[in-house]
Amino acid sequence: MEPERIDMSSLDRGDWQRKSAALAARALELRRLRRTVVVRGSIALGLSMAAALVLWLFAPKPQAPPPTPHAPSLLDWATHDTDPTEVLRYAQ
Amino acid sequence: MKPVPASPAVALAPSDARASGPAGQTPVADLVRAARRGDASATEELIRRHLRAAYAVALAVLNRPADAEDIAQDAFLIAIERLDECRDPARFSGWLVQIVRNRALHAVEKRKLRDPVDHEGEIVAHVPASDVVLRGQLLAALATLTPVQREVVLLHDLDGWTHAEIADALGLTETNCRQHLFTARRALRARLEVDHGT
C-alpha cells in the first residue's frame, strides 16, 4: 500500500496567482522588447546592405593607367607604321 | 501508522491548474501556441498552471525555498522568451522542467563557488516559528532523498500532479514514478518521525 501523502504545505511559498500575473507581465514585456530589437535590427541591417549595394554599383570606375612610354625598338619599327622623324630623332 | 505532523493552518492544496489540464480547460498545447503569438491571457494561464511545479523542481535541486522561487521565475522568463524553441507544445511541462533543472543546477554551482559553507534552508521572519521548524525538518528530510525522488514527491505532494503527468514531464514510466514516490514518502516519513520522536 502507498504511504500516506506528506503535507508539504509549509514549503509552499503561496500567492501563486499574483506571482503568475506579475511574471506574465514581465515575460510579455521582455518578449515585446526582444521582438522590437529584432525587427529594428533587421530593418537597420537591410538598409545598410542596400546602401552598400548602391555605393558599390555607382562607385566611379577606376581609370586605366596611362600607357607607359617604352623605348623604341627595331622590332616596333619593322612591324608598325612608324614616323621616319621618330627614327631619325632616335638616331640622333 | 503514525501521522506525520502537518502545518495546522494550511490545508493541503493540490494545484487547481495541472500541466495537461482537467476537462474543460484549454489544453496546454493550445496555450503554448497562443502564447507564441503574444496572447497575454494564454501566457498568464500557462505560467499559472506551471509556476508551482517549476518551483517544486527548483526546490528539489536547491533545497532552499527562496532561491527555488527565484530560479523558477527566471526559468519561466527564459521559457517564455524561447517559446518558439519548444518543438512539441503538448510536452511543454517536460521542456520547462528541463530548463528549470538546468538553471537550478547552474545556481548550485555558482553557490558552491560563492558560499562554500552551505546553510540549509532559511529563516523567514513573517512565518510562525512552528512552520519554520517544520520547514527545516522537511528540507532536511528531503535532502536525504535522491534528486529524482525529490522531484517526484514535490511535484506529487506539493503541486498535486498525477503520476502520468510526472512520468511525462520527467521522462519516467508511471510504474517507476510510483516506485519513486513510495520510496520517497517512506523515507521522509521515517525521518520526520525520528525528528518528532527526539
Image: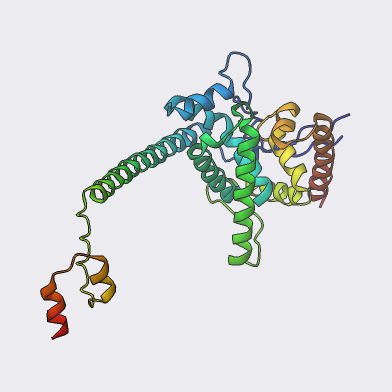
Name the outermost residue toward the bottom. A92
Q: Is residue B63 visible?
A: no
Q: Position of residue B1 (x, y in %)?
A: 87, 34
x and y percentages locating residue B33 in the rendered image = 51, 25
Residue at 79%, 44% (x, y): give it: B188
Q: Residue at x 71, y 41 (%)?
A: B151
Is residue B156 shown left or right of residue B73? right
The residue furthest top is B24
Measuring from the top left, give residue A35's x and y in whole percent.
Answer: 38, 38
Nearest the camera: A75 or A55? Answer: A75
User: How many discs mark residues in the rendered view?
Assistant: 0
- Horizontal side of residue A61 vs B10, given as left or right: left
Identify the image quadrant of residue A9. Answer: top right
Colour theme = rainbow
Q: Is residue B112 above or below residue B50?
A: below
Residue drawn 59% across the image and 36% down it: B52
Q: Position of residue B179 (x, y in %)?
A: 85, 35
**Above or below for B174 versus B153:** above
Q: Nearer the viewer, residue B5 or A30?
A: A30
Q: Is residue B22 above or below residue B15?
A: above
Of all residues shown, which one is farthest toward the right?
A1
Taking depth in this image into account, of B82 and B47 the one nearest to the observer is: B82
Q: Quadrant of residue A82?
A: bottom left
